[in-house]
Amino acid sequence: MKIGFIGLGQMGRGMAARLLQQGHELIAWNRTYAVAETLQQRGATAAKRLEETLDAEVVITMLADDVAVEAVWIASGLVNRMPAAVVHLNMASVSLRMALRLARLHQDRAGHYVSAPVFGRPQAAASGQLDIVAAGPRDALAHCVPLFEALGKRWFDVGTEPAHANIVKIARNFLLGAIIESLGEAFALVEKSGVEPAQFLDIITSTSMSAPAYKNYGRLMITPPPEVTFTLKLGLKDVELALQAGGDTGVPMPTAALIREQHLAAIARGYGDNDWAALGNYIRECAGL
Amino acid sequence: MKIGFIGLGQMGRGMAARLLQQGHELIAWNRTYAVAETLQQRGATAAKRLEETLDAEVVITMLADDVAVEAVWIASGLVNRMPAAVVHLNMASVSLRMALRLARLHQDRAGHYVSAPVFGRPQAAASGQLDIVAAGPRDALAHCVPLFEALGKRWFDVGTEPAHANIVKIARNFLLGAIIESLGEAFALVEKSGVEPAQFLDIITSTSMSAPAYKNYGRLMITPPPEVTFTLKLGLKDVELALQAGGDTGVPMPTAALIREQHLAAIARGYGDNDWAALGNYIRECAGL
Amino acid sequence: MKIGFIGLGQMGRGMAARLLQQGHELIAWNRTYAVAETLQQRGATAAKRLEETLDAEVVITMLADDVAVEAVWIASGLVNRMPAAVVHLNMASVSLRMALRLARLHQDRAGHYVSAPVFGRPQAAASGQLDIVAAGPRDALAHCVPLFEALGKRWFDVGTEPAHANIVKIARNFLLGAIIESLGEAFALVEKSGVEPAQFLDIITSTSMSAPAYKNYGRLMITPPPEVTFTLKLGLKDVELALQAGGDTGVPMPTAALIREQHLAAIARGYGDNDWAALGNYIRECAGL
Amino acid sequence: MKIGFIGLGQMGRGMAARLLQQGHELIAWNRTYAVAETLQQRGATAAKRLEETLDAEVVITMLADDVAVEAVWIASGLVNRMPAAVVHLNMASVSLRMALRLARLHQDRAGHYVSAPVFGRPQAAASGQLDIVAAGPRDALAHCVPLFEALGKRWFDVGTEPAHANIVKIARNFLLGAIIESLGEAFALVEKSGVEPAQFLDIITSTSMSAPAYKNYGRLMITPPPEVTFTLKLGLKDVELALQAGGDTGVPMPTAALIREQHLAAIARGYGDNDWAALGNYIRECAGL
């Protein structure tokens, strides 16, 4: 399929490489052109101008945050120049507010829009092992299915409202934050009584908490990764998306509120660029460990 | 094995029945004698006096809380009348404070003491499907292994300090509370945006949160169980055990603190005798759902 | 003095009336012209176009929030058309972010800018009983002093950086929120034990908490006011300004975070348009009162 | 009046000295006899045995906490040996639970019991400047009024139920904790934006927060006192009394819950024996200050 691809950050690069490897044709754009160029060896066309990405069946946006979407996709006027047949497939994590706004923008001009945020880190993106949550009008969605199959080990259809996919992503990432915070507290508790966190982790992940999230973040909390692929600062961004969505829809989220402040403190104490699991270090400090 | 069994609440009854079925000999005592009598048909001896339970190789206590342990096991003088050869196996969830006190009491009189709290609801107890976390001096522990095998589908050895088993149980149950609270918040968030919590649950438990705790409590939150086997009030007790242990060992647990107050509010609003998952109902109310 | 006055909401109307009564000359603008017209009887000139307000010595802005400032003052281009001699005096409560942005905008064009948010409700505005916190370059500030004296019973000079006045206002209003929340909790606690909140309030405001904030909000909590002059929703906005400022400057504010969620819940349960003190009603509900 | 006085800690010593100075006759007991002896120079009788204190019109207990009351007053059997005519006046801060228990103990034996906890630090005790909150049956209370007048600059009558005085004290001290925590957060916020906390404090205590609690704790937060008279650890005890009372009466107190954990963290980081206001130091640390 001929695909426009906008946004080649850590996640975007991995996804673009995977799509090329799976035989798709890519016109890739990045704020820094040099990054797009690196994909040329793999067969992509590096776009100099944003508009070039619109000469495609589907345009994927994988921009860092709302501000980038605003600048690159909306304020640039790109969204309004999208040919009628093209599908905009937004796979980045945006706020609920932006998700609703994008849906409205496309609806107003009868454009095709699918939202499909992903779960997974850059490595999973590059190897087609993402989990994808997709929503959008049936026709548009049908166009994107081959891409979900190329990029994900699984994908979920949550209906026709694009923003529904985003709220699922936001709520799920909030749960990740809650796991990290509560695991950090539990680790500090057992450690201060003389039990190794690793042993505790082994017990809970052998029984009722036998989920990848506990296993991965528990392990990262005990042994920091050699390379950081998802920073604590990005974790804060995710928690704030939940709080903003809660504010906009009238849902109190006291756990999210608490976690946000823990992140701010962890950042103030120097853990912002560490892996998200470093929240556990801050929690240990608070316990005098 | 000849076993004294003290405390035939919902959990204790199931465990006692399982032990009988597995061929062990039981002298069972309960505060209300009639409950002990019901086990006679299954072959147990119903003890009229507490002391009768000491005529055994291992005495299991499965009392409701610290107050019951204090009254039945300590203030009654039973602990001091334990013959030298008998092993006290405490399988109930007590506070860290009580766990340390029991260990000290036994140590002072050179008694044999093993702590082995369990994960699981009454049904798991009756069918030998518990998860057991055990700790105690090697000799005493070795005596108890056949019982762990009869009662559990798995057991974990966390070393020679009995209280280590308790802190693992306390920290793990705090994590359960954190799962319920955060899941309740996430459910309210997606629901207010138009996504069915059941669909959200399906997605997260198919991916990074594919653990029994999420599956079970998520399901219970969506469809309350016909019969309540673990009440929200008991959940509060568990969260308070974590807070007390945190206080005693100097570990701040802001998430546990928040969750305790949510439980108090849920109880004040009438959910105390519902299943623990009913915390989600309270959270929905707070979101105006 | 000849004053441009932009923004005639509840507070702005009171302040404008007071300035007229104290002998100042006013060119008043409001989004809804009819509101400006009502001030004509008192001697003001009702401006049809925003630019008319710039024909003055000082232009006061008293706009509702950041969005209004953005639209009316910045996006309209007004700030860039300000004559060199005019002083912009912003007396509204804006975010720290907007406060810094306004300071930068003026600095870039060598404009005169003073920030002077006020404490007090509309009645205090109309009677010159506000408390004013002012900051800005010395020359510009000196021009505004007569206005502070007309409007306030007191004013505080917090230096040359305009945004310093805003952070003081934001931090102080957060403290108000903390007072309301904690007072609500304390009231529920004593009430459930049989002590009248009114008696409790009398005791604490006769002793260590003898401050207007406790007296006023305590009274409003016990007897809701006949007319609402500051809604719970506006209280939420103030708490969110603190959280945003905390996020921007790296200051964790766990109390503010908790209070925000309490406000969201109170709003979801129907108290949003009540007086800020109605937070106490929500807290009572949570205690089953 | 002839007074038995039990408990000569920092507060008790000051109160005992004041009573002697005001012409009362004292039989003073302390766990460490030497402390009671020091009062002999001022005219007190130092009791060797607890029972000696019962030879009085009123017996004041000023014991450190519930555990001390349990040991010295209840388990010792003293309460049961109180002559019919003697009034027990408990001026210490006990839990709601203990307050209710003491009331019941006296009621069961038709004894005279008044509860009258105090607000103020040791210096205020020694100079008769305490604030006293009293409750108890009318006759018994009437006996104590001269003592309230000797010790306090003010006293409040909150009715016939002794425990009502305690819940007022507990709720008020929780508010103190909330003031310290929120003030700490506000100080960190303004400081990070470049405003001196002292200036902020001056503004708020000149306006809506012009209460001794803000003035004193604000000052202590900026300039730690040369001598610590109320430690952060004691502050934690007070917050925990509120949480326990909330738990017992079904009142969620999310602010108290949050503050307790902040105290635990501050203690873990070494501030436990500093003045209560040192909570602000911990909060500053969390902001990277």
Image (cartoon, coloured by chain):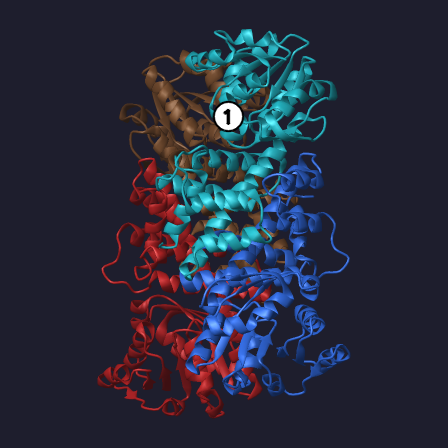
Chain colours: A cyan, B blue, C brown, D red
Front-lying residue, B98 or A225: A225
Left or right: D72 in relation to B191: left
Secondary structure of the residue carrying tag 1 is helix
Image: C269 above or below D140 = above
**Residue depicted at 44% across the width and 15% down the height:** A35
Image: D81 above or below C118 = below
Q: Is residue D157 visible?
A: no
Horizontal and vertical percent for residue B224?
74, 53
Front-lying residue, C137 or B191: B191
Image: A283 above or below B139 = above
Q: Which residue is mark 1?
A: A11
* Label 1 packing within 10 angstroms: few (<14), some (14-19), many (20+): many
**Residue depicted at 65% across the width and 45% down the height:** C269
Left or right: C161 in relation to A110: left
Quadrant (top left, top right, bottom left, bottom right) of the N terminus of chain A = top right
Left or right: B174 in relation to A284: right
**Residue depicted at 61% across the width and 83% down the height:** B53
Judging from the image, mark 1 belongs to the subunit labelled A
Q: What residue type is disc 1 on?
A: Met
